[in-house]
Amino acid sequence: MMEVEVQSAIVDLLKREKKLGDEEEEEEEEERWMKHYSSLHQILLVGDGDLSFSLCLAMAFGSASNIVASTLDSFDQVRKKYKNAKSNIEKLVDLGATILHGVDAIKMKLHTDLRMRKFDRIIFNFPHAGFHGKEDATRLIQMHRKQVSGFFHSASGMLRPDGEIHVNHKTTAPFCHWDLTGLASNSSLVLFECVDFRIADYPGYNNKRGDGPRCDDPFPLGQCSTFKYVFSPHAKKIPNPSRQHCGFAAAQRPPRVQAAVSPYATFGGQYSSPNAYAVTNNGLDHNAALFKPSLQNECFRFFGAYFNQVM
């Protein structure tokens, strides 16, 4: 009788241990979201100033184990420039973040700690080449465009399957004249969605000027959006708008550029969404979306076209 009771007690104990183990596993795998970002995403933050955006995501997730936060400045420069940087860094480290300093957005894919990494989301908030005169000066716009173009080229090779590149950017003149979507297409990136950016959605995030005596001050945001891009090897190259639309400084509206159409948009097969792909007016259609076609139909179309040519 005692032997049966012992066996029963052991079984109950094993069941309780299994239940606890399952609960712990569920807690470990619990997914949390902050706007467009999941705690399960591998996330790279580029040029994150005082690292407050990285910390915002980490606090929302309850962990930063999947976050790589990077700054262009060195560790010492970051601490000197931003009064809250030291505290932000300490909190991120406690939450398990990887923090990298001295990371150039243009060359980051060659960085020792990044060249073997792939990410679900790569985020660049308000890229800026520095304060070198008036923002509507053609020369300065070209400097900004060169920086963003280099970033796209580097980031495009750092995405995991279904990964996305997000750029938060002002949509009023003269910033809209940078033509992000045209620059992205040169790195085989396609705009699939553009949504309003509201800083209030990211508690704790402080945008910074980042340079000069007022480097720790915020800059006015005004109207701005989150531009979302995905890699597509067949992305259509868009002519350089600086040549197509003369005089950035004189323009009062963003130049209308040719849409970077996904190769999927040309297929007549079944799509995974009932909506249509649309990107116009420099990508400012906030209903824009890119959808994936049926793989079977895509293959049929490719091979069908090939055999028609052979025959």
Image: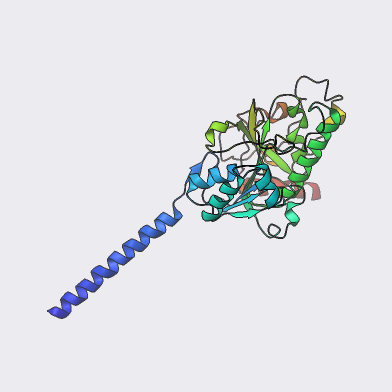
Q: Nearer the viewer, residue 290 or 146?
A: 146
Residue 13 sits above or below residue 295 on the image: below
x and y percent of residue 196 in the render? 60, 30
x and y percent of residue 145 in the render? 79, 37
Q: Quadrant of the N terminus?
A: bottom left
Q: Residue at x 65, y 47 (%)?
A: 79
Q: Nearer the viewer, residue 32 or 221?
A: 221
Please give left or right for residue 90 compared with residue 224 in the image: left
Please give left or right for residue 65 compared with residue 106 in the image: left
Q: How is the image coloured?
A: rainbow
Q: Residue furthest left?
A: 1
x and y percent of residue 40 in the render? 52, 51
Is residue 311 at least partly visible in the picture? Answer: no
x and y percent of residue 184 in the render? 74, 40
Q: Quadrant of residue 47?
A: top right
Is residue 215 at least partly visible in the picture? Answer: yes
Q: Nearer the viewer, residue 267 or 178?
A: 178
Q: Residue at x 17, y 80 (%)?
A: 3
Please give left or right for residue 126 compared with residue 28 in the image: right
Q: Residue at x 28, y 66 (%)?
A: 15
Q: Nearer the viewer, residue 57 or 181?
A: 57
Residue 10 sits above or below residue 308 on the image: below
Please give left or right for residue 207 compared with residue 12 in the image: right
How many numbered marks appear?
A: 0
Q: Residue at x 50, y 52 (%)?
A: 63
